[in-house]
Amino acid sequence: MKFFRSPVLPLFVVSALFAAPTLLAGDATAPTAVDSGSFGVFINNKRTATEKFSVEQGPDGSLVTTDFKTEEKDGTHQTTELKLGATGELRRYEFKDIAPGSAQAVLEPKDEFMIQHSTLLPTDKPEEHQYILPPTTNVLDDFVFIHREVLAWRFLAIGCRQKDGQVQCPLKKKLNIGVVIPRSRTSMLVGVEYSGRDSVSIHGKPRELNLFVLKSEASDWQLWLDDDYKVVRMVIPDLSTEIVRD
């Protein structure tokens, strides 16, 4: 069993892990910034894209937004908005292509399942796609890197425990978590495990971080989180891709 110090986590993580949302500091009526910044996306050591992101929490849930752009002129540009309830259940997810196309989709819970309405053009009639999945399923969309941080928080909430002011996570014990990928209109299981402390170089400086591994039928990811549970670095080994917090 490995130990972390216990910072203030997003509302749905605190609710699940500590069962005490009132532990959150600040004005209960105003949103609180949990995380914000940008990730640089590097393929074969060349920067190819940037994702700007924001995570906020309020008394009733959390809001995760992103703005993704590739580096080339007239490249890809998309935005996303993910609204979650107080315990992490989906309320609404939307992605919009700004360039080169104008595809968009909205995913919302309906009864015990989830419904997605998608269009390629604003004038198109929306196509409906149903997922036989509960609203507690994590959204893990393509080209949305902050969603991996939210997935790591889910793992901390359901796969680890809090004791004496520390979070305890079992070492290299995989936990399968269901995810939905709206852009691909598919779903799958992702195995998440904590692999211990790891020394890595970030922007040329050595840091000791917490290594998590995500395994799925699509690809394997490595995530390095700091002691505030914020992703600092991600690697997709099979694709020679590295994502680093700016």
Image: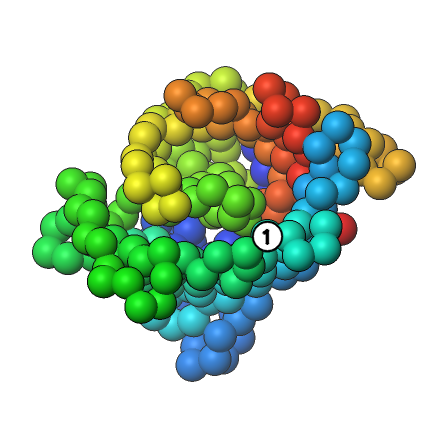
Q: Is residue 142 above or below residue 28?
A: above
Side of 31 relative to 124 (left or right): right
Please tell me which residue lies in front, 135 or 21: 135
Q: How far across and how far down the image is residue 66, in percent? A: 54, 59
Who's the residue at 53% across and 71% down the image? 32
In the picture as drawn, the residue positioned furthest to the left comes out as 111
Q: Is residue 107 above or below residue 211?
A: below
Q: How far across and how far down the image is residue 6, in percent? A: 56, 47
Q: In this view, does 82 lie above or below 144?
A: below
In the picture as drawn, the residue positioned furthest to the right comes out as 204
Side of 128 relative to 83 (left or right): left
Q: Which of the 4 image quadrants contains residue 239?
A: top right
Side of 62 relative to 165 (left or right): left
Please tell me which residue lies in front, 166 or 131: 131
Who's the residue at 87% across and 37% down the image? 205
Q: Which of the 4 image quadrants contains residue 94?
A: bottom left
Label 1: element kind: loop
- The residue type indicated by label 1 comes to Thr
The answer to whether residue 74 is seen in the rendering is yes
- Neighbour tally class for label 1: few under 14, some 14-19, many 20 plus, Cα within 10 Å: some
The answer to whether residue 228 is seen in the rendering is no
Who's the residue at 78% across and 36% down the image? 46
Residue that carries the numbered disc 1 in the rendered image = 76
Who's the residue at 72% across and 37% down the image? 42
Q: How far across and how far down the image is residue 240, in percent? A: 67, 24
Q: Which of the 4 image quadrants contains residue 184?
A: top left
